[in-house]
Image (cartoon, helix red, strand yellow):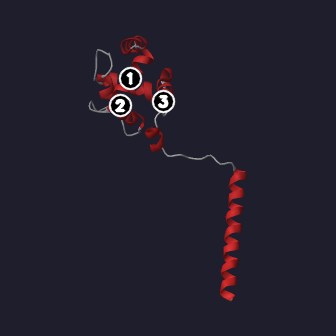
Amino acid sequence: MLARFRKDYWTAVKGVEGYHAAVEKLGPRYHEMNTERQTYNDPNCVWGQLANLTNIPTKNVYKTRKWLYTMWKDDRREVRSLFEAQRAPTNSQEVSNKPRIAMVDNDTLRIQQVRLSLILHLFRCEIEQVSYV
């Protein structure tokens, strides 16, 4: 019974491509799908809106919202990872809005710390020389 239920949804949504098409129709609201506070209980939630954008006959009902949520959150059939890979930032606006985190190895970090320590030491020495003059 459960396998048939899932198969029916995948057939109705037209596979991963159909799921992606519905998510695309959400526009910028698709980011809400990644937040922890978004649940599928409320018919007006993002999952309810996504359900209304699919070809699933039982649109905005609890089971449909739960199925859409589970497919996305558990990355079943790689729905989320494929969509996010496809949505890789292509325009400068989307790139500029995301925070950048630089990955620095430990050796580089130590070198920077030594440099800062030397600069601080030299600065202190200059202050001491000026105060003696």
The image shows residue 40 at horizontal and vertical percentages of: 34, 31
Q: Which mark is residue 84?
A: 3
Within-10-Å neighbours for mark 2: few <14, some 14–19, many 20+: few
Between residue 93 and residue 104, name the one nearer to us.
93
Mark sitting earlier along the chain (1/3): 1
Give the amino acid type for the residue marked by disc 3 in the picture. Answer: Glu
Which secondary structure lies at badge 1?
Answer: helix
Say if mark 2 contacts mark 1, CB within 8 Å: no
Say if mark 2 contacts mark 3, CB within 8 Å: no
Residue 27 appears in the picture as rendered:
yes
Give the amino acid type for the residue marked by disc 1 in the picture. Answer: Trp
**Residue at 70%, 78% in the rendered image:** 125
Q: Quadrant of the N terminus?
A: top left
**Residue at 39%, 17% in the rendered image:** 18
Residue 66 appears in the picture as rendered:
no
Within-10-Å neighbours for mark 3: few <14, some 14–19, many 20+: few
- On the image, numbered disc 1 is attached to which residue? 67
Between residue 86 and residue 8, name the one nearer to us.
86
- On the image, numbered disc 2 is attached to which residue? 27
Which secondary structure lies at badge 2?
Answer: helix
